[in-house]
Amino acid sequence: MSSTNQLRNLPAVDEVLRCDEVVVLLAKTSRNQILKWVREAIDGCRDEICNGHCVDADEARRMVIATVLRCAAQDGSRRLQSVINATGILLHTNLGRAPLAEKAVQRIHECSDYANVELNLVSGLRSGRGERVCELLARLAGAESALVVNNCAAATMLVLQMVANGCEVIVSRGQLVEIGGGFRLPEVFEASGAVLREVGTTNRTYLRDYESAINEKTAAIIRVHRSNFYQGGFTSEPGISELVSLCRSRGLPVIDDIGSGCVCELPSVGQEEPVVQDSVAAGADLVLFSGDKLFGGPQAGIIVGAEKWISALRCNPMMRALRVDKLVLAAIEATAEIHLSGRAADELPLLQMLSVSAEAVRQRCQKIVSTLHSTDEHKVAVCECVAQVGGGSVPGSQLPSFGIRISGGDVEKVAHRLRMGIPAVLGRVQDDSVVLDLRSVAETQLSALTVAIQSAIVADASNNE
Ligand SMILES: *Cc1c(COP(=O)(O)O)cnc(C)c1O
C-alpha cells in the first residue's frame, strides 16, 4: 500500500476522543487540552507514515492513544504534588525546602476561607496585617519588632532600599555569596539601589577594614552568613558584636543577613549556625532570615529588630509589593507558636529528621526491605549513606544515615518510574543503583514508599522481559 493509501488508516479525532482510555482523562484534564494532544498524536502518526512506516488502522489507533496517554502522564507529573523526598537532603530547594508542621497545615486550612488577616475581632476595626504573627516572631527573637515579606532575598532588598537609600553599604569580600539558582547576593543588594562597598579579602577581613571604609556616604554595614559554603584555614572576620560596637560609635545600623534562620537548639550538625536570638542580643539593628530553612516554616523573609526601623519598613511602598498572603501568615503563626511552646523537637518535621538516630533510620529501611518482594533482576538492600541539611543551611553537614539501595535492571528507568509514581519518589542515582535515603522521609510516608518501590521494580522487571 502506498503511503497515501496508508494515511486512510489514521483514526479520526472523534474516534480517539470516544475510546475508554481517553474518556477517563476528562476527569482531570480539559477537553480542549486532550483535543490538542489527540491532534498532535495524529500528526505524529501521519509523519511516521509519510516517512515510510507501514501502519495498519489498528496500529495507528494504538499509537495515537499511547501518545495521548504519554502526554497526559507527563502533564500530570508536572502538576504540583506531594513528593517523597528520599534524597537525604532535608531542606531540598527543588522540593520546596522545609516540610510544614501538621499544625501549620491545619492553620492554612482554617484560614483558606475568609480570615482575620487585617481585622481586630474585638473592636471590629481594621488592624495591622498579621499583627499577632509579627508579635510572636519578635518575642521569639527577643527583638522589639518583626515583619514578614516574601522571602529573605526580598527582605534584603527592602531593608537595603530603605536603610541605604542609594548610599553605601559596607560588606566583607568573604561574604559575597551566590545563593543558588544563579542569584548572587551582591547583585540582589545592588538592585535595591544600594552601593556596595567591599572591604577585606576573601579569607580575612578585619574590623579596621570596615572602620577605614566608613565615610560620609556610608549608610550601614551588612554581614552576610556564608550559609551554603564554609571557609577554613587562615581566615578571620569580626563577629557581630564587634561590628555593632563600631557602628554604634558612628551612628550606623548593622544589618545581619543570616539566611538559614536558626531559632532553637539544633541537634548536633557539625557546623555552627548563627542563631537569630544571639544576633538580636548582640545588638544587630535588623536581622533577616528565611522562613523555610531552619525555622521550618513556609517560604518567607522574616525581619526582626529595632522598632524604629521595622515601623519605617512597614510603611515603605515596596512593602505592599513584597507582603505575604494569609496562608503564609497562617503557617508562620503556627510555626512560631511551636517554637515558643518549646515543642519544636516534637512537632517540626525538620527537627525530627535532624534528630532521629541513624539506628532508627536503619530499622525503618530494614522493615521496608523485608516486606518487599524482590524480582529476578533487582536486588534491594539496606545501605549506609550520608544525609545533609542542604537548602543553603549548615554547609558541609554530614548526617549519618541509612537508605535502600535498588540495584539491577535499568537503574535510570527505575528512578524514572519512582518519580512518575503516585506518590512521586525522588531518590538519587549513584554507583549503578538507586539509593533512597530514609532520613528525609517522614514515618507516615513509609508504607506509601514501600508500595512505590515495589511497583517500580515490578514494572521495570516486566518491561525488561
Ligand atoms: C538562603 C539565603 C538567602 C535567600 O533566602 P530566600 O528566602 O531563599 O530568598 C539570603 N541570604 C542568605 C545568607 C541565605 O542563606
Image (tube, helix red, strand yellow):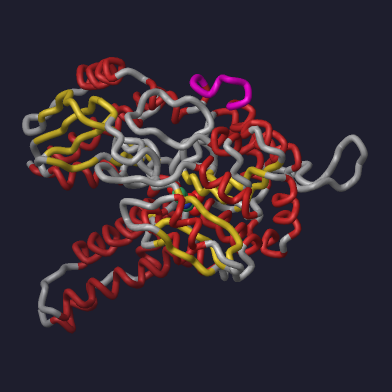
Residue 244, position as x, y percentages in the image = 57, 45
Look at the magenta stretch and give its main secondary structure: helix
Horizontal relation, residue 326 to residue 60: left or right: right
Please state the extent of the stretch shown in magenta in the rendering: 339-346
Residue 362, position as x, y percentages in the image = 25, 19
Return the residue nearer the eye: 392 or 8.
Answer: 392
Residue 100, position as x, y percentages in the image = 51, 35
Horizontal relation, residue 3 to residue 254: left or right: left
Residue 192, position as x, y percentages in the image = 56, 67
Q: Residue at x 28, y 75 (%)?
A: 43
Return the residue nearer the eye: 419 or 323.
Answer: 323
Asked if residue 178 shows in the view, the reply is no
Horizontal relation, residue 113 to residue 374: left or right: right
- Decide whether residue 177 is among the magenta residues: no
Q: Residue at x 32, y 28 (%)?
A: 439
Is the residue 16 above or below the residue 383 in the image?
below
